[in-house]
Amino acid sequence: MIKSIRLFSLGLALFAMALPALSQDNSGSSQSDSARFVNADWHLQKVAGGTYFRQYAFVDTVAPLFKSNQVISILALEKGALTGEQKNKEYKYGRRVVDIVTAGKLATVSYMAKSNEAIASVNGSFFDMDMTKDASVTYFRVDNKELAANRVEKQGDEYVIKFMQTAAVATKGGRLFIVKADASDPDWVNKVDAEDMLCTGPLLIYNGEKMPLEEISFNTKRHNRTGVAALADGTLLLIVADGRSKEASGLTMKEFQQIGSWLGAVDMVNMDGGGSSTMYVVNRGVVNYPSDNKTFDHNGERPVANAIIISFRKN
């Protein structure tokens, strides 16, 4: 069932808290952008077990966002089912969990979701498109098994990590959380208590503070974006912004960061984007507009190295 709602069920208060800070923000957005985002007639679908899908297309002739066409899709995972505190009665599988998965080869997000009986999924982190397997270019482990090593560079006496490794998404007991990288310790990934872990970046928001962003084309140009955000109440958000078409311009990293701020994120990290950005919802299929086929439709999925999936577990 899909119905229109005035605001996200995250609540008017959540958005209202974010609005006063906007006038002091240097992102280039405006008060009208925040109002359009808050007051958009978002479409809502309850997926299952405290998981909701929301989407809205901001059209420049009616209500543009950042002076452009934008299509924003969000999966919201309420805390109770996320942590296993509530038993889900709608699905036979049990409690809801979040995992990071791979098909052992490049595969589409929808393939990995269906293979794992997931109710929803988004693409994961960065990878080498020329590799057929073991394609991840950032640290990656699944079920405590390392599949891709941490990559660090040493400049003089200091270790340097690239923007795509400044943070990680990690899971333990079916709960996903965001970790800030420790640039001073090349072994920091092995000190995180997690079953699954995937390095990514840049880190956009941490402990409620917007992180500084490098002035590089990856950040300053508009692209499709995928991100993960955590709210203060324990809600987890998986966010996809479409791009590379006249119907959806894509976001700069600062614009993406600003959307996270409007949503009330205390932590937020960027995942792989561009043609990789994909969101899948059970019984609907791909719900965003992946751009790898250069057509504004739901058929342009790119095979990727890994994905974040939401599913149900009996134990």
Image (spheres, rainbow, N blue to C red):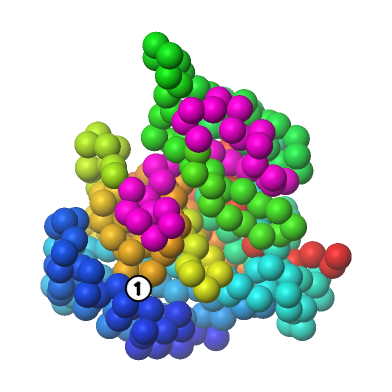
Residue 22: % across, % down: 20, 68
Q: Quadrant of residue 118?
A: bottom right
Observer-nearest of 288 and 308: 308
Residue picked out by circle 1: 56
Residue 129: % across, % down: 49, 30
Observer-nearest of 151 and 273: 151
Question: In the image, is 139 to the left or to the right of 90?
Answer: left
Q: Residue at x 43, y 41 (%)?
A: 201
Question: In the image, is 213 to the left or to the right of 130?
Answer: left
Question: In the image, is 253 to the left or to the right of 277?
Answer: left
Q: Residue at x 36, y 85 (%)?
A: 12
Residue 26 visible, this orientation: yes
Residue 290: % across, % down: 42, 53
Q: Residue at x 77, y 78 (%)?
A: 87
Query: From what the image shows, is residue 160 above or below residue 67?
Result: above
Observer-nearest of 149 and 153: 153
- Residues rendered magenta in the picture: 182-211
Residue 57: % across, % down: 30, 70
Q: Looking at this rendering, what residue extends furthest in the top direction?
A: 156
Q: Is residue 265 magenta?
A: no
- The quadrant of the picture occupied by the C terminus is bottom right
Residue 129 visible, this orientation: no
Q: Residue at x 46, y 46 (%)?
A: 271
For label 1, the crowd category at 10 Å Cα-Cα, with few meaning under 14, some 14 to 19 and many 20 or more, is: some
Residue type at mark 1: give it.
Tyr
Observer-nearest of 24 and 49: 24
User: What is the number of callouts on the image?
Assistant: 1
Query: From what the image shows, is residue 246 above or below residue 150?
Result: below
